[in-house]
Image: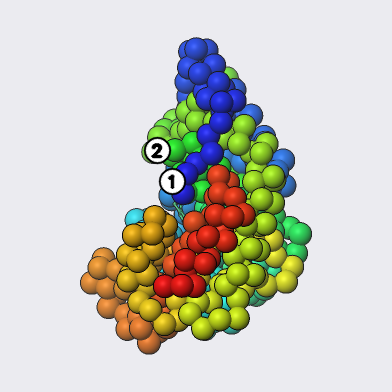
């Protein structure tokens, strides 16, 4: 994946560097306004990366030792790691093999008296069934936190992800639709939470009567102004980027459907996929062998995300029988393949890759 950094983006970074105001200034404030407008949240709080966003949300909500947080078994490891680093216990739930998102029907049976939150991940840029998840959360008095790291602009029933739960978390890592290298942002409608997040990201500082007071043992999770400038420009182009990626994805789906070797992703009704990754399942050849074969043809592919309970740290600590407990997460981890899909590709690139894939 090649980030699409254009001259206007570079110019805006240079002008911040020349301004002398490098951290959390005007450009960060602008970014926070732009994101809350775009997503439709009351607040947006920019921080240093997507993992820091989730770490701060959990801290600010007081989730920690003795608490359980429900997460999908298949995601990027950061989702489980943030739960672990605040001292809470991640409770893994298997995914739906058609969407690669948490299987909504399995959530309720994972809830115990210790459960504090549900943390669904909009995997590969496709929204989870957020309305159903919010109904379950309400019934059991749980907090919903959306890991929308790779889903800026994704919608469920025309409502933007990042606005369903108590807080939404987005990343600006180079693998995401818009990037500033390292960066992240939190969306929330809750005034108290927003304040707490702003304080925690900046050494525990709150301004009281025009004076800095250190009211928490805070972190330094601030974003720089030149990073904010970089994403501000890309955000303007995002709707076009998402449309174009959707056109590319449609060609892949047309080319790869109804055949024995691969299963292209399915898109449920009423959802807008943002195609962070175009993730297919291989049905005959080993996925790792396919990656090698395609590499020799000059096509770069990779696996999509981890079956998290199968990774060393989690296996040592929780020793879960992951192949039986989370068969879909295991299948997606072992048979899933991400095909190239980014702005700098064109329709004939997609045809070329599809044909090479069908011929291996
Ligand atoms: C990228 C990603 C993260 C981590 O974001 P960083 O900005 O790299 O820290 C977390 N969760 C998911 C689902 C991601 O895709």
Q: Position of residue 126 (x, y in %)?
A: 60, 63
Quadrant assignment for the C terminus: bottom left
Examine the image and state in which quarter residue 86 appears.
bottom left
Q: Secondary structure at mark 1?
A: helix
Q: Residue furthest right?
A: 158
Residue 219: numbered disc: 2
How dense is the environment of label 1, judged by Cα within 10 Å: few (below 14), some, or many (20 and up)? many
Mark 1–mark 2 distance (CA, rounded to whole Å): 10 Å
Assess whether mark 2 and mark 1 are in contact (beta carbons under 8 angstroms).
yes
Q: Nearer the viewer, residue 2 or 295?
A: 295
What residue is rendered at 33% in x and 70% in y? 288
Which numbered disc, 1 or 2, marks the residue closer to the eye?
1
How dense is the environment of label 2, judged by Cα within 10 Å: few (below 14), some, or many (20 and up)? some
Judge: label 1 CB < 8 Å from ligand 1: yes
Q: Position of residue 261 (x, y in %)?
A: 48, 80
Q: Label 1: which residue?
A: 52
| Residue 235 shown left or right of residue 85 in the figure | right
């Amino acid at each position: 994946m090649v980030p699409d950094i254009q001259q206007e983006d570079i110019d805006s970074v240079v002008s911040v560097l020349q301004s002398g105001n490098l951290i959390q200034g005007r450009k960060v404030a602008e970014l926070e306004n732009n994101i809350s407008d775009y997503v439709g949240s009351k607040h947006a709080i920019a921080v240093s990366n997507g993992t820091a966003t989730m770490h701060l949300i959990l801290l600010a909500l007081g989730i920690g030792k003795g608490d359980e947080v429900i997460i999908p078994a298949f995601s990027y490891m950061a989702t489980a790691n943030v739960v672990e680093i605040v001292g809470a216990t991640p409770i893994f739930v298997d995914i739906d093999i058609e969407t690669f998102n948490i299987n909504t029907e399995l959530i309720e049976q994972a809830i115990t008296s210790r459960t504090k939150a549900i943390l669904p991940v909009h995997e590969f840029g496709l929204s989870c069934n957020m309305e159903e998840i919010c109904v379950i959360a309400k019934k059991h008095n749980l907090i919903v936190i959306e890991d929308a790291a790779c889903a800026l602009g994704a919608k469920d029933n025309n409502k933007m992800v990042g606005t369903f739960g108590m807080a939404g978390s987005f990343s600006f890592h180079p693998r995401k639709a818009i990037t500033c290298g390292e960066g992240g942002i939190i969306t929330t409608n809750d005034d108290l939470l927003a304040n707490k997040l702003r304080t925690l990201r900046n050494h525990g500082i709150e301004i009281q009567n025009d004076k800095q007071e250190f009211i928490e043992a805070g972190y330094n999770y601030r974003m720089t102004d030149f990073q904010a400038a970089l994403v501000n420009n890309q955000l303007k182009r995002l709707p076009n980027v998402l449309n174009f990626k959707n056109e590319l994805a449609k060609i892949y789906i047309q080319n790869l459907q109804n055949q024995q070797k691969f299963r292209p992703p399915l898109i449920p009704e009423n959802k807008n996929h943002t195609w962070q990754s175009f993730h297919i399942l291989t049905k005959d050849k080993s996925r790792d062998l396919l990656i090698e074969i395609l590499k020799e043809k000059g096509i770069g592919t990779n696996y999509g995300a981890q079956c998290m309970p199968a990774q060393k740290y989690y296996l040592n600590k929780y020793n879960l029988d992951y192949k039986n407990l989370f068969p879909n997460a295991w299948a997606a981890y072992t048979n899933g393949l991400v095909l190239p899909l980014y702005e700098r590709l064109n329709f004939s690139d997609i045809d070329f890759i599809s044909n090479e894939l069908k011929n291996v």
